[in-house]
Image (cartoon, helix red, strand yellow):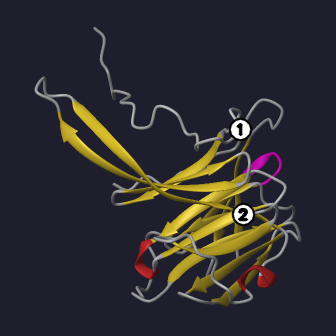
Amino acid sequence: MSYNAFELVPVIDRVQLMGDKPRTTVQCLDCAAQNLFVGTGDCLIIHYIVADDVSPSGKAVFQYSLQGYKQLGLKKPVQQLLTAAAINRLIVLCDGVLLLLSMMGLEMVISGFKDKLKGATCVARNDNPASFDPFSVEVCVGTRKKVIHIVMITEDNVYPKREISLAESPVHLNFDGSTVCVALSSVYCNVDVPSGKIQELISYEPQNTRPIITRIAV
């Protein structure tokens, strides 16, 4: 007996701007409500508005409109982007640099933000923080210095909370409550933020596996 756990529904047929390179590739994306943000291989941030509806046959259909785009001017693809709707900001990781943009206009926020966390390798937003602050977002940033930083980001600045050393530079991570799950070069670890204790979980083969850590809310 066959069972379809989900159905793929096309939203945007082709991510390409008028007159841009035909080889534009999608590297990462994130969304907040109807706002969809796409990071590309040629260092662009593209903002779409996506509206959903139901067709007469009962299937989900989507319509999208291009709201704007931003060329970051760096040499490498956009690695990660995170929406922070509470503070109307977009957190972007590109070429080891963290950038803070406004969500609606994609304007760069000038605050010395990118100079405080250089050499970043990965970043994750805490969607389940131990304490809620409506004017900030809690984020974990991994760096090439074999350290993860727990920081609070406001509309125009970043405030460090805690720094935890690791055995290696983190490749990928995710943040939930007071725990950060980190992928190192060949092993996954759990990091307890309050105590700084690190627990190895399982190993993986980096030659065959790209580490991805996702929080699933129940």
Q: Which mark is residue 72?
A: 2
| Residue type for callout 2 | Leu
Query: On screen, 189 above or below 120?
Result: above
Q: Secondary structure at mark 2?
A: loop
Q: Which residues are magenta?
A: 184-188
| Residue 186 found in image quarter | top right
| Residue 118 found in image quarter | bottom right
Please state, as top left, top right, bottom left or bottom right, where the N terminus lies in the image.
top left
What is the x, y in percent for residue 148?
A: 74, 73
What is the x, y in percent for residue 127?
A: 45, 69
Q: CA distance from mark 2 to mark 1?
A: 16 Å
Residue at 63 percent across and 77 percent down: it is: 193
Query: On screen, 185 above or below 117?
Result: above
Residue at 78 percent across and 69 percent down: it is: 97
- For this rendering, which residue is in front, 157 or 189? 157
Main secondary structure found in the magenta portion? loop
| Left or right of 147 in this view: 24 | left
Residue at 74 percent across and 48 percent down: it is: 42
Q: Which mark is residue 21?
A: 1
| Left or right of 121 in this view: 17 | left
What is the x, y in percent for residue 53?
A: 20, 41
